[in-house]
Image (spheres, grey):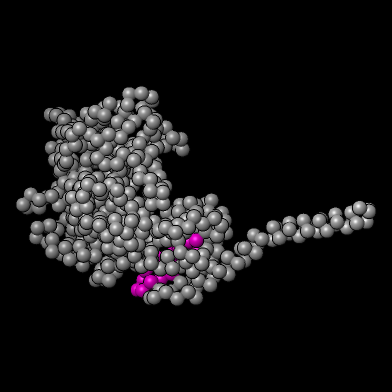
């Protein structure tokens, strides 16, 4: 080969390499331009009763939702589509531009909803999933997640809030995802807690083919009884008689006494009651003795208030309206000081939730005093809302026949919604669907976890990966490893077990390590 020819070949190879490099360098810009065009075209996508109002690419990094002070970081680039379903159901669909898992994950709401669940959408997006959320058809007053004023004389908005908004967001979201990617999602999932947990059960009952997998935490499924028999009843127990009010400073006293009596029953003194139903603590031991400083003890009316809250509400014939809370995990920012006592009378979350609901949605009178509501006398006003709000059907055969899976979870120390409420629902499911219920639905109780998180227990766990494996690989969750994190450091792990099993220490290895525990059914479990 002569020198000139060799030089020509080297020059050709160099130009080819340079061309290839320029294509590689140019590709992200080309891909981004294509994605932007593809994304923006969604505004012309026609959907029944629905308008896609905007569709734009959000670059990788941080995102500040409009009208929100929150900033979400470490987000991949995504197409953000916003829309409205008649009459006023706002929704958003986020679709990652890079690696997409092929999954569509719809996320639920909390309280009275009224906002897009941006934080949960960001979590779904970081997993590589397309994500969807809705405000359920209304906007709540800023800073008041339990505002129900929007519902005054608006039964159609109550219907949207109860079930219609999430279902239509799911239906439309699937079509938008297919339009953007040119293919349907391989699997659709729903993830929510509290109101969101109830939304998950509503979906499984009313719209059993919407999702392949549902994760429903601390579910507010029997909404009307929850609001009368829990929110209002727990508030009434401490507010009807001013002398029954529990001062916030006394909650730690109660929690410490419960732990002294029951914490070590599971063999480990760690501030967590593994099996709260085995705790038969009597708050009367905290009753004031003659001459004792009332700030260091409980008055007789305060003792009765605690007993009433643990016993739960009943109608005039003695039938349970809603179960009571259970002992354990009362202390802490997310415990009874937030939900039961508040910083002062009439400032606790139970009261704020009940007050707005009964004034606007139940009685239709902004001046109504919720403390005057009598279940036996006034329950018809409550029951007229049940068809739109309650998700109490225990027969999930249609959901099972669709091949879908359900993971329920609930914190044993939930000061909002009693975990017994979810146990009752799962037991009813087993009665309705038989001994093979666990083939498609499992319940995981979380010792020491408060409402959807917080508390002294292992409250950090990944139920989403568990439902994905169950749906896509057929691997049912026999346990879910959970962590307790202090100042960003994991200091304890524990397996969460499918009900009725509980985590039992083997006696070998550190009791802070999940590997030292096995899941076993308790010998005796007593219902409240």
Report x, y in % for residue 266. 26, 29
- Mostly what secondary structure, the magenta segment? strand
Residue 314: tell me if it is visible.
Answer: yes
- Left or right of 158? Residue 192 is right
Region in magenta: 80-95
Report x, y in % for residue 187. 42, 58
- Left or right of 69? Residue 311 is left
- The C terminus, quarter of image: top left
Report x, y in % for residue 23. 71, 60
Q: Nearer the viewer, residue 316 or 395?
A: 395
Residue drawn at 51 percent across, 67 percent down: 182
> With respect to residue 210, does 450 lie above or below?
above
> With respect to residue 406, does 154 lie above or below?
below
- Left or right of 25? Residue 66 is left
Residue that lies at the very extreme toward the top in this rendered image: 508
Report x, y in % for residue 444. 30, 43
Residue that lies at the very extreme toward the front in this rendered image: 1
Q: Quadrant of residue 294?
A: top left
Residue 521: in magenta span? no
Count of all numbered marks drawn on residues in the image: 0
Residue 88: in magenta span? yes
Q: Quadrant of residue 276?
A: top left
Q: Nearer the viewer, residue 418 or 47?
A: 47
Q: Nearer the viewer, residue 35 or 17?
A: 17
Residue drawn at 19 percent across, 37 percent down: 525
Residue drawn at 39 percent across, 75 percent down: 48
Residue 340: tell me if it is visible.
Answer: no
Residue drawn at 69 percent across, 57 percent down: 24
Q: Nearer the viewer, residue 178 or 10?
A: 10
């Amino acid at each position: 080969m002569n020198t000139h020819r060799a030089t020509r070949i080297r020059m050709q190879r160099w130009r080819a390499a340079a061309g290839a490099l320029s294509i590689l360098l140019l590709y992200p810009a080309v891909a981004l331009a294509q994605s932007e065009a593809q994304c923006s075209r969604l505004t012309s996508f026609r959907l029944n009763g629905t308008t896609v109002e905007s569709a734009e690419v959000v670059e990788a990094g941080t995102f500040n939702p409009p009208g929100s002070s929150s900033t979400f970081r470490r987000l991949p680039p995504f197409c953000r589509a916003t829309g409205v379903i008649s009459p006023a159901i706002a929704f958003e669909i986020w679709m990652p531009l890079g690696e997409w898992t092929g999954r569509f994950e719809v996320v639920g709401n909390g309280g009275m909803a009224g906002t897009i669940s941006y934080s949960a959408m960001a979590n779904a997006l970081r997993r590589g999933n397309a994500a969807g959320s809705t405000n359920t058809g209304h906007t709540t007053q800023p800073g008041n997640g339990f505002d129900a004023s929007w519902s005054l004389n608006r039964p159609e908005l109550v219907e949207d809030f109860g079930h219609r908004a999430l279902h239509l967001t799911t239906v439309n979201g699937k079509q938008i995802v297919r339009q953007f990617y040119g293919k349907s999602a391989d699997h659709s999932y729903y993830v929510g807690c509290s109101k969101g947990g109830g939304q998950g059960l509503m979906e499984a009952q009313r719209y059993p083919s919407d999702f392949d997998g549902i994760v429903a935490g601390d579910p507010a499924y029997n909404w009307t009884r929850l609001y009368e028999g829990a929110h209002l009843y727990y508030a009434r127990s401490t507010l009807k008689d001013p002398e029954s009010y529990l001062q916030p400073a006394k909650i730690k006293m109660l929690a410490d006494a419960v732990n002294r009596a029951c914490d070590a029953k599971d063999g480990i003194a760690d501030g967590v009651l593994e099996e709260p139903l085995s705790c038969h603590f009597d708050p009367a031991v905290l009753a004031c003795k003659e001459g004792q400083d009332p700030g260091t003890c409980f008055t007789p009316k305060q003792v009765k208030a605690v007993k009433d809250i643990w016993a739960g509400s009943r109608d005039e014939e003695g039938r349970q309206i809603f179960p009571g809370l259970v002992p354990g995990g009362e202390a802490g920012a997310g415990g009874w000081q937030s939900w039961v006592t508040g910083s002062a009378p009439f400032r606790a979350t139970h009261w704020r939730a009940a007050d707005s609901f009964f004034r606007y949605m139940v009685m239709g009178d902004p001046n109504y005093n919720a403390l005057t509501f009598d279940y036996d006398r006034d329950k018809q006003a409550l029951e007229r809302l049940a068809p739109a709000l309650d998700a109490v059907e225990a027969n999930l055969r249609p959901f099972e026949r669709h091949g879908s899976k359900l993971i329920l979870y609930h914190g044993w120390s939930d000061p909002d919604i009693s975990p017994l409420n979810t146990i009752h629902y799962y037991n009813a499911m087993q009665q309705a669907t038989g001994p093979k219920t666990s083939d498609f639905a499992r319940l995981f109780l979380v010792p020491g976890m408060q409402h959807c998180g917080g508390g002294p227990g292992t409250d950090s766990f990944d139920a989403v990966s568990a439902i994905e494996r169950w749906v896509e690989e057929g691997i049912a969750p026999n346990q879910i490893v959970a962590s307790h994190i202090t100042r960003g450091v994991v200091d304890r792990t524990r397996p969460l077990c499918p009900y009725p099993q509980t985590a039992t220490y083997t006696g070998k290895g550190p009791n802070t390590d999940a590997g030292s525990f096995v899941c076993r059914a308790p010998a005796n479990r007593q219902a409240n």
